[in-house]
Amino acid sequence: MSVLFRVLFVLVSCASIASNCLADSPTSYGTGFAVTSDGWLLTNAHVVEGCVRVEVRGKGDASDPRVDANNDLALIKIAAPEPLKPLVFRRAPTRLGEDLIAIGYPLATLLADSVKVTTGNVNALAGLRNDTRYIQISTPIQPGNSGGPVVDRDGFLMGITSATLSKETADQIGITAQNVHFAIRASVADLFMQSQSIDSQSGDRAPDQQAISTADLAEKLTPSVFQILCYGKPDMQASTKPPEASTSLPAQPVTPSLIDARGYDAIGFDYRTLKDVTYADCHQICEGDDRCKAITYNTKYGVCFLKDNVVALIRNGDALAAYSSTKAASVIVSDFTSYSGMDTPGGDYKRLRNTNYLECFTACIGDNACKAFSYIPKKSECWLKDSLGHPRATKGVELGVK
């Protein structure tokens, strides 16, 4: 069979069974990475939305997509015959100017189809229009990078590659901005995972940890990063443009949105308490009040606490929290767990008088010796503990445990 005949045969076959040809070729590409050992991957919502089928290259088809379109995040599941190596979320806050590394599969149909590593730094602690869900990064971003991890020089996850300034934006402002790219903060992704009852791993740099070279980081982390293939996206099938994944940001909210944090208590200053309301009511009231920056809703008693500030999130199985996206850059997602009406005897080494819950929490989190604290609202008294006894029910005590 001549070369010309083979080409004509393929063209005629594709014309007569177009749907099968389209189904056999990916219509767009992106990147994802392991966040659990049992097969959950994190990526961007725009990488997987609208796909008839999602394939993780080398791992087969993905299933059970969980999508947060507002924050451009998605979770997908693969059948992992062997445990994956999940990336570890960084606990420490992001610092302006610090070095970072982006890993992904940019321009895989044009360049080598292998994973690629690029370096840069943090240019700004917010995205477009001061959107603190994002950090601005100088790491070069191309179509196909979307959904890939952005890590610090110790290999901890700082963000998820999301977007770069589009040509349309450049045309609007009349300037071709160079090297302006954005990543969704890892803390926003962590809360999304919590909302889906999927636990992440988190950690911090050890005091004696030595700097890791880019080559060593690449060798360590790239086995956790995968190419995501989207098949049959209707809007892509009708287009003759090459697939592009990282060309524009998600629509910005007109007003600051609330980021949900289920299973957490927002630590801040309460200015209003509402009883016998639903979480949806609490959420809506806060969104309509310019003063409100966060809420905590007690599911056991149906009580809503409106807060005009928020500094941290503390785990609480009886609570649902939400906080303003304008606070995302400064909120600490702590490993503390809060218990109402509980105490642990013994271990007290410091008492703080005339204090509030927030000051008690801050004192403990800033003291390496502190393992827990007991706060007594009626006495405005805080006890810091360096060891834990057996928990017991104690009326009028708020217990926080690291």
Image (tube, rainbow, N blue to C red):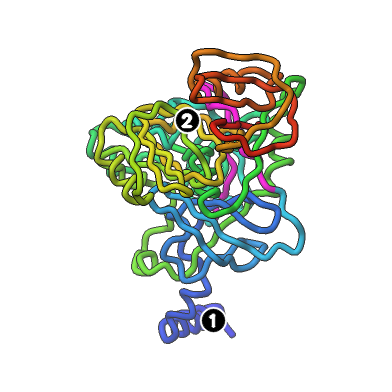
Numbered label attached to residue 124: none
Q: How would you rate the neighbour count of disc 2 (Cα within 10 Å): few for under 14, some for 14-19, many for 20 or more?
A: many
Query: Is 373 rendered above or below residue 314?
Result: above
Q: Nearer the viewer, mark 2 or mark 1?
A: 2
Prevailing secondary structure of the magenta residues: loop
* Residue at which label 2 appears: 267
Q: Image point 41% across, 82% down: which residue?
A: 15
Front-lying residue, 377 or 365: 377
Q: Amino acid at mark 1?
A: Arg
Front-lying residue, 223 or 377: 377
Q: Amino acid at mark 2?
A: Ile
Front-lying residue, 343 or 35: 343
Name the image quarter holding the N terminus. bottom right
The answer for how far apart the CA atoms under marks 2 and 1 are is 68 Å
Mark 2–mark 1 contact, CB under 8 Å?
no
* Residue at which label 1 appears: 6
Query: Is 345 rendered above or below residue 222?
Result: above
Query: What's drawn in magenta, residue-wise?
Result: 86-108
Residue 372 location, x and y as percent?
Answer: 66, 27
Name the image quarter holding the C terminus. top right
Residue 156 location, x and y as percent?
Answer: 64, 35
Of mark 2 and mark 1, the one earlier in the sequence is 1
Residue 293 location, x and y as percent?
Answer: 35, 32
Q: Image point 49% across, 47% down: which residue?
A: 262
Would residue 87 be found to the left or right of residue 330 on screen?
Answer: right
Q: Is residue 101 magenta?
A: yes
Q: Image point 62% across, 56% down: which residue?
A: 40
